[in-house]
Image (tube, rainbow, N blue to C red):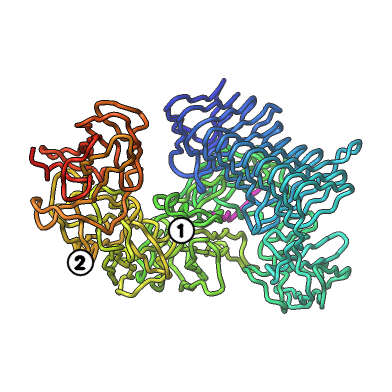
Amino acid sequence: MHIANTGDVLIKGDLSAQGSSIIYLDSGNYWLDSLKLSGSSKIIINGNGEVNFYVKDNVDVSISNQVGSPSQKVNIFHYDDDQVKLGSSATWYGNVKSYGDFELQGSSKLYGAVQAKSLELSGSTRLYLDAGTYWYEEVDLQGSARVIPHGDELTTFYIEEDLELQGSTELGTSENPVLAFVYGDGDDDGEAELEGSSKIYGYVYVEGELEMQGSTNIFGAVNVVDLEMEGSASINYSAIPVSGEVHHYKLSFDIEANHLTAYACGDEACSEALLYSRPAMLHIKDGLNNNSISNFNNFLKSDKDTNPNTKLDKNKCIQFVDKKADPKPETSPGLRCYLSDGTRLQNCKLCTEQDVQSSLAAHVYDEITLNEEVLGETAPNFDFYIAELNGTGTLKTGNKILKEGSAVSFPLDLTYNKAEAISLTIKGDNGKNGKNKLEVEYQLELVFVPKQLRWSAADCGGKDGFIYADHAASCTVLGKAGEHAGLTLQAYGAGNKRIDDYSAQLKEIVIRELTADAKVKDDSPIIKQPAVNFNQSNKPSFTSDKSISTVGLIQAMVPDSCAPYAISDSGCMLETDGDTAIIGRTVPASLKVVETQSGDIKDGVVYAGKPGVSFDVAPSLTVIGLDAKGKELPSFSGEFAGGLKGNSSIALNSDIALKGLVPTFDEPEAGKHVISCDTDKLEFIKDKRFPETALNLPIQLAIENHDDTQGVNGATTPLAKESDTLRFGFVTLMDAEIKVDEEGTMASKLNYFGKDVQTVLEDNVTDYELEQATRVTHKPMLDPELLTLAMQEIKVTGYGEQQKGIQVTIDGLPDWLRPVDKDGSLTNPSAMLDILNNFRLRANDSIFNRREVVR
């Protein structure tokens, strides 16, 4: 089923899918009564952009497929108090907002933000929760469910009633702890309870009781009224992590009171708990009028200036600029400015009402409103029309396309579909003629810029890191180490809509090489890209200025920028947001075998049909990755080398039949991969007779080309030394005579074929046990307890009567000990037992091989 969408689609009734059905959706908004998905049904998004479901009644998803992606989210806005269920083994990328309860079941995963009445996770679910602040009545985790915060800021939970963890559930991680306030509803105090082996990584504040049972743990700190701990429960104290550096400085300006507050922020969100706690200095000047505004000296976390020198009464615009900052902020822009109501000041610039130029700039597909605030007083009884319009795109008000001559009225909301500046002339008159006719004209320049420049991102595991089995297909291979990597940008307007034509010179692009855990480390290689002449229509892609030196994840950062036509005398009218994303990975150009190790079999002998081969030294080949210039890559390590396992095979270059020759992998040193064989599974087939054979046979390694990396073909190493041999062995059971009423034994030998199958030799060294057989039988049957299996013989109990020609057979011996019959099939060892009143006259003892006797 394919549902087209040009903005909003109203579905009267349910949107449902069962079995293996597929729903194809265009990006946009969908209004429906309920959403029901089950089985292996799928939702596939056409094109780019997000899908938003606005659901009136219940949401019940129980599927085994992925919905959405990191770049194409499927969001659910549930505006009733019914429950939202996501279950089975679904993987859902998108945000959930509901007035009802949210439940994650089975082994499903959700990547996004969840705002709901209550939060319940069960089974082995995973909630990869966007960092932020969340309000719930209850939070309940069961089974082995986990809540894993994602993001730079501290994730905070405000819980009205109960926080409960059972089983082996976990809230937070050691790297991303949480802050949980269980505050009660006024009449009842809030409660928190941990059972089983559940864990909280973070800081728990409970106005009522915190109860910990079993082997539960809290890694962080608690502040509670009542604390009850049982079993081996423990609280492992650690302080709330405070940034060791200043992430950025924040200014909050209260215009009415003329108060300016400075914050030294430790994270992106400038969380109060993570403010920089050591002395900081920030001097602020007016970048437009060149006068000092405020000096914040040696302040801790934050400081307020109740009389900053803003001079807004004299200047139409001021711009806050950090004249001096110590310590230097880690990020750019290092100074971020807001009004006291939370409104962010673009470029830290503030203008009085007389300067309204910024209101004439908007993001592509977003609105510019023409009203009295922009135009001055508008004549209420005039008729207005568009007299002149210069632009290459489509100007709209609502769904109406505007052209020269189109009638308009104020206030007028305008949207535009291209990134450019357009000129617009609107004229109006009072409808009279002659001397009574009055006219007015507005000449405007409207600027529309991209909302964001965004990288073509890849799913490489995000904050959890790259795992080859999960991300090999979704983490794009950008190129080979030693080569330049390709990068692609896309311009977007408001509503996450693509822009097809935009040009600008982009500066300060930074490319980082990351390890598999996706962390930026102090020694992470960095490429600072020269200015790039970006053109969305014919040059959206470009290559890194320098070659990538390692095998790794590639992170690219494009900073906030200003469209060239949006730069005015007072600065940038409206910025375009930048983006930081992991865009793919690099791989080796080729693989190479640099070392081989010949095998050395323990005791020098292997018997066909015996599972497992014991080696003093196992045969192996050591493989490394090379970059495009032939340089060894220690970074071809861990998960980045995960493709070896599924693309490597080993074979014995011989006619000898065997099974269980499967490769094993070890990495004793970064980038050096030792490929050997699983000696416990190796077994030579015992199907037809053969003489003793030397095992200095070549093992051949083949690694298929994969991930744009050239593999290996034809590398060999000897399975064993020349003196190590393979034998066709078998147990020979010896005929025996035993006197009536006396105990005795029937001996056995381990034989094998020597230089040919006519030569039978005895092995007096190799251990074997007849007790490995399932049973020993005799015909005719005399006594069930007559015969007993021992190590390498059969024990015979005393029997009171003479009996000749008893056939004794050992059943169920391991194949490597079984003899073969005339047609080559494995059989069971057999011999004759005589119980006699008097022994035959022989020069030797009473045990002999029947073939020695002439009858």
Where is residue 447? Give x, y as percent. 57, 56
Q: Residue at x 69, y 71 (%)?
A: 245
Q: Is residue 11 above or below residue 429?
A: above
What residue is shown with label 1?
Answer: 583
Is 443 colored magenta in this rendering? yes
Say which label, 2 or 1, has the lower sequence index: 1
Q: Which is more toward the observer, 560 or 268?
A: 268
Region in magenta = 440-450
Q: Quadrant of residue 726?
A: bottom left
Label 2 and label 1: CA atoms lie apart by 54 Å
Residue 515 badge:
none
Foreground: disc 2 or disc 1: 2
Where is residue 494? Give x, y as percent. 56, 48
Outermost residue toward the top? 13
What residue is shown with label 2?
Answer: 723
The kind of secondary structure the magenta stretch mainly shows is strand
Q: Is residue 38 above or below residue 702?
A: above
Q: Residues within 10 Å of mark 1 (few under 14, many from 20)?
A: many
Q: Residue at x 21, y 47 (%)?
A: 730
The residue tagged with tag 2: helix, strand or loop?
loop
Q: Amino acid at mark 2?
A: Ser
Q: Residues within 10 Å of mark 2 (few under 14, many from 20)?
A: few
Q: Quadrant of the C terminus?
A: top left
Q: Is residue 461 above or below residue 742?
A: below
Q: Quadrant of residue 802?
A: top left
Where is residue 367? Give x, y as percent. 61, 46
Q: Which is more toward the observer, 316 or 337?
A: 337
Relative to 193, 170 lies left or right: left
Q: Is residue 22 visible?
A: yes
- Find out whether the residues at labels 2 and 1 contact each other: C-beta distance under 8 Å: no
Q: Is residue 775 visible?
A: no
